[in-house]
Amino acid sequence: MARIVGIDLGTTNSLVAYMDMGTPRVIAGRNERNMVPSVVAMTDNGLIVGDPAKEHLTRNPARTVYSVKRFMGKSLEDVQGELTYFPYTLTEQGGVIRFKLGEKTYSPPQISAMILKELKLRAETHLGESITKAVITVPAYFNDSQRQATKDAGMIAGLEVLRIINEPTAASLAYGLQEKTQGTIAVYDLGGGTFDFSILKLKNGIFEVLATNGDTHLGGDDFDRLIADLLIKEVRERHGLDLHAYPDHMQAVRLEAERTKIRLSDVPKTMATLDLPDGKGRFTRELTRDQLESLTMGLIERTLAPCRNALKDAELTPDRIDEVVLVGGSTRMPLVRQRVQELFGKTPHCELNPDEVVALGAAVQADILSGGTTDMLLLDVTPLSLGIETMGGVMSSVIRRNTTIPASAKEMFTTYVDGQTGVDIHILQGERELAKDNRSLARFRLKVPPLPAGVPRIEVTFLIDANGILNVLAKDMRTGQSQSIEVKPSYGLSDSEVEHMIEDSFKFAADDVSARKLIEARLDADALITTTEKSLLEGGHLIASDHIAATRAALVALTAAKDGTDPRAIRARMADLEQAAQLLTVTLLNDSLTKGLQGKKVSEVM
Amino acid sequence: MARSMCWHCQSEISGEYFCDRCVKVQPVSKELDYFTCMGFPRRLMIDQHQLETKFYELSRAFHPDFYQNKSAAEQTISLGNSAMLNTAYRTLRDPIERAEYLLDLEAGSVKQIRNSPPADLFEEILELQDTLNEYRAAERTSGTESTLRTKLQSERSTLERRQHDMEAALQQLFVQWDALQDREEATDQARAERNRILKQMRESLSNRTYVKNIVNDLISTIG
């Protein structure tokens, strides 16, 4: 079976890992960094991703997307409250958010696909083989729409997503592999944009999730925002400047806030520094860890409620938890560790790098799926209750939260009016009483044969698969016939839209690769032309004139090829020129060595 | 397990969930009850440890993770079997759900939650509802509020004791049921005994659910 990689598609950073002879490993990029910043920038030369894109955050904020994960599976209305924080333009089309970057618009799955492609390329370069299959992690508390959007992103990137797996459970796999732990463990996962808390029972290689809870809108981003708001306020007070009018400076503030927060995990106080717009100089301010903690205490407290809820659902008290594991970059904050320690009365584990442990776990799950690891099995749960809207706008629960997946439930439907030919079904996800307070997943119309009221009997099966994604099947109990159901997602791309995006993506991928090759060839050609001309100037008098003529001819040919659009032709003329100029190059080298040696004793040279 | 044909090689199957000949996974029959599915007799006292061991064992046999390289047909069976196994385990793991399920199998649906209090609790419950309403209407941090709160808290422990007693009584019925089944008698007396236990169990289960809902309501009101 082809290799399957594990991908942590994070709010702030993303990683790709694979199983190397029984040990999961993160794949580093050419810059030797393991993390790819989850940033995509639209530049004049095309789209760029990761570290180079991060530089565009302050240079070109309106066309640089970060934290795209916050928008996955969301409508514009869902994120209305925080739109002012983002410098890019958002629109909505068919219930799905679109980022406006230059002339074109992109859905969140398309932006995420660009990050995934970068990771795919990274894995392909490292492993020297084509990668088409992946396990991708999502926050455990992601709903159906958000999971589906992640799967779509994988497809658009040319990856078959064999499994969507929950981040805290992935982390537990990485820990379980390492420690061979048994007992009840809790995973506290505070990332860049999301918070998850899961309780698992580990026994003989089975990882059984007992309960999970979380907040998909709580993470490091929110901490940074509080610091940034403080700095913005003080700049206004001290300099009378409203930084909101300068999108590039707003990004600089956000990035400085993040750096300040990170530094304060190691030192008790640090300086936050900002360059002010319009040549107003520089703003500096000392920030202490105590100040940071009183600023962010409320956010940290907010993580404790999901912990308590999960404990309640698992019918456990904190003292019954054997081990607590910390995951996610934000758990580096000392106050987070302290509060977790206080809640459970034990020192939490953080032996594995909290930035990498999720990707490592994804690689373990990938290995399980490819048949490599057979002694471990993850039994996960659905984080939210699934239900249908009933008379009076009330949600009737069909599959309860924390039910082990795959999970299925059947409901029987009939008609209320003679000759009625359809029954409308509205599927919801959430814990609230009223339908309108829960997440609308999909609506569909069940086809019913025209019969007297109450006679038709249509059995609908709701099946949540191992990815936590819903599938719906309907069967007419009178005829035994199954009917396929076109479920129109309330906040997602339709199948045809995804297909279209996949096509686009391949088209652009081909364009992108050839464009990149051409640019690289031209740059290399320029460099060669410059050095050759310099050599001719310096050493032209040292070699025979026919060599000089041949070199000049090759130079002209390369310059002509460089104006063309065929990177292979450029490479061929470059080889010709190198060949023609070889004598010149060697002669010059010898000449410089001789000159260098003149007037030196043998002992100095040796 | 009833003898049937393998969906793949059409040979007769005598094993549990896998064909002896072609080793393909077989769909768990929809007629199979959860007890049989998990390899337990229809008893109400179940060894939790054994149940969990069986659940893990069957999870390893059915889980979709282990069918990635198999045919689409086998993947579909794996998904269906896993979902069924998870439901079976969840139902049998909880003593109350287990008893309700058994009643359902033996005597038809019982999941009728009563909407009026059981006779012996009637007055107590009515009074409690009044107190709850008064409490909800009372001003926060007022003296009345704290008096009512104390009253509700003592009411809560009374009801929780009642719930506990009911569960103990149910436990007795479970033991009686299992003993009756173990005797495997086909006499009229045994049949009468069976009906008596089922009837009492139905009554106790519905009373207990009623009280439990009241307790939950109470807890969510007074926090």
Image (cartoon, helix red, strand yellow):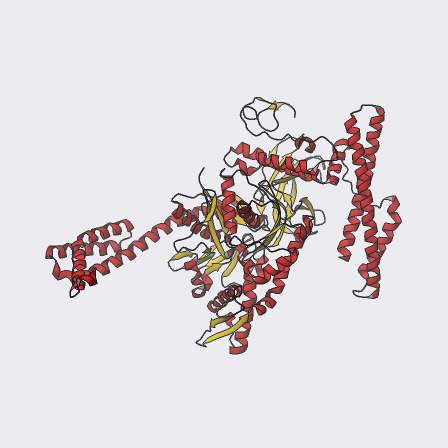
Q: Quadrant of residue B200?
A: top right
Q: Quadrant of residue B58?
A: top right
Q: Is residue A284 left or right of residue B198?
A: left
Establish if A271 lies above or below A139: below
Q: Quadrant of the C terminus of chain A?
A: bottom left
Q: Position of residue A258 (x, y in %)?
A: 51, 64
**Farthest residue toward the top?**
B12
**Farthest residue toward the front?**
A603
- For the point 84% across and 63% down, the residue is B144
Q: Quadrant of the N terminus of chain A?
A: top left
Establish if A489 lies above or below A293: above
Q: Position of residue A592 (x, y in %)?
A: 18, 62
Establish if B9 lies above or below A567: above
Q: Is residue B175 left or right of residue B31?
A: right
Q: Is residue B114 visible?
A: no
Seen from the viewer's position, the closer of residues A394 and A201 is: A201
Q: Is residue B13 left or right of residue B197?
A: left
Q: How many marks?
A: 0
Seen from the viewer's position, the closer of residues B139 and B65 is: B65
Seen from the viewer's position, the closer of residues A487 and A22 is: A22
Q: Quadrant of residue B39?
A: top right
- For the point 76% across and 36% down, the residue is B109
Q: Is residue B128 visible?
A: yes
Q: Position of residue A499 (x, y in %)?
A: 47, 45
Q: Position of residue A245 (x, y in %)?
A: 50, 71
Q: Is residue B99 left or right of residue B18?
A: right
